[in-house]
Image (spheres, rainbow, N blue to C red):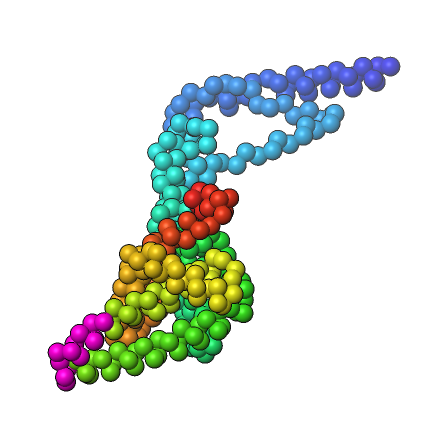
Amino acid sequence: MEQYITADRKKKQRISQAIQPDARAAAPCVECGAQRTGRASAPSIPWGPRPAPQTPVLPLLPFQWYNVSRPITDTGLCPGERVSLMGLRGIFDPENGFFRTLSRMVDVVGLSLLWVALSLPLVTFGPACAALYHTVTHCVVRQGDSTYLTFFRSFRANLRVGIPAGLLVLAAGALLLQGYQIMVLAANSVGGGALAMYGCYCAALIVPAGVSCWAFPLLSRFQMGLGHLLVTSFQVTLRHLPQTLLLILLLFVTVWTTAGFFPLAVFTPALNALLASLPAERVIRRYLPEEENGGEEEL
């Protein structure tokens, strides 16, 4: 029994010595001379479970130190940073005016190259013209999607009527061009009556040129046979003469500029269709059904 009491006393004595203040804690610091606080050193308990080690706290990274005292908003950003990020988002937003204009320019160049490639065989000249007008009005003017997919769908849909219509337009254009050159030579050599005939011939060219200008826009918007297409184009040419003259003038300027400098063909075909759609669509909308016409106006 005395043996157990003696062991207990020794244990209590070790505990009391452990929790007593350290003599060095009360002594001043040797290096700086500052007075120590005199706090007791941590007791070393020889029994019982050891306390779990605390998770070390990592210091803040350098880029976080600058954000400690900034005002926090609902987005976690300062007001100035939020405005600057909104400005960057607006610059790189594909829906802003700059990127939409750039997208239209790329579509104009791509559609022009497609039209040139598909018109070179001459057999597919008509479907290519109808597909070009249809794609420009639906994807470039009205900002639709799937530009090139729309082009090929329209090209395939207009093959049956577009091929004979295109060949007929090319043949008539070649004959009328030959007649124009003959009239020019006659007016320069003979004069007088030949000059009057030259004027009448140029006035007569309005009708076939107008039919050629209206045929492919009408083909891209309506389903009709070749005969019905030619008759309808003739009627629209005479009924809407101001718009017809504007289309002929636009076609003449496009052909003249492209023939003078052929690299302009990179964008002149689609640009011609884009400008021609402005007066042509006003006329075509008058002949559309009311339901489809309402949808066109909303676009």
Q: Residue lying at the far right in this picture: please name it.
A: 1
Residue at screen point 78% across, 19% down: 7
Q: Main secondary structure of the magenta part?
A: helix
Query: Between 120 and 211, which is closer to the camera in this rendering?
Result: 211
Spot occupied by residue 232 in the image (x, y as percentages of width and height): 43, 61
Spot occupied by residue 274 in the image (x, y as percentages of width and height): 36, 58
- Look at the image and tell me whether residue 4 can be seen: yes
- Look at the image and tell me whether residue 114 can be seen: no
User: Could you tell whether 68 is left or right of 242 in the image?
Assistant: right
Residue at screen point 62% across, 18% down: 19
Q: Residue lying at the far bottom in this picture: please name it.
A: 189
Spot occupied by residue 168 in the image (x, y as percentages of width and height): 43, 75
Q: Quadrant of residue 112?
A: bottom left
Task: Check if residue 82 falls in the magenta segment.
Answer: no
User: Could you tell whether 294 is left or right of 273 in the image?
Assistant: right
Query: Between 85 and 185, which is closer to the camera in this rendering?
Result: 185
Query: Between 41 and 145, which is closer to the camera in this rendering?
Result: 145
Query: Between 187 and 50, which is closer to the camera in this rendering?
Result: 187
Q: Residue lying at the far left in this picture: please name it.
A: 192
User: Compared with residue 143, is residue 149 higher up or lower down, i.e. above or below?
Assistant: below
Q: Which residues are magenta?
A: 188-200
Spot occupied by residue 2 in the image (x, y as percentages of width and height): 84, 14
Residue at screen point 83% across, 18% down: 3
Q: Quadrant of residue 103?
A: bottom left
Q: Quadrant of residue 83?
A: top left
Number of marks drawn: 0
Residue at screen point 51% across, 62% down: 224
Quadrant for the C terminus in the image: top left
Quadrant for the N terminus in the image: top right
User: Compared with residue 276, is residue 98 higher up or lower down, i.e. above or below?
Assistant: above
User: Could you tell whether 72 is left or right of 21 in the image?
Assistant: left
User: Could you tell whether 5 is left or right of 193 in the image?
Assistant: right
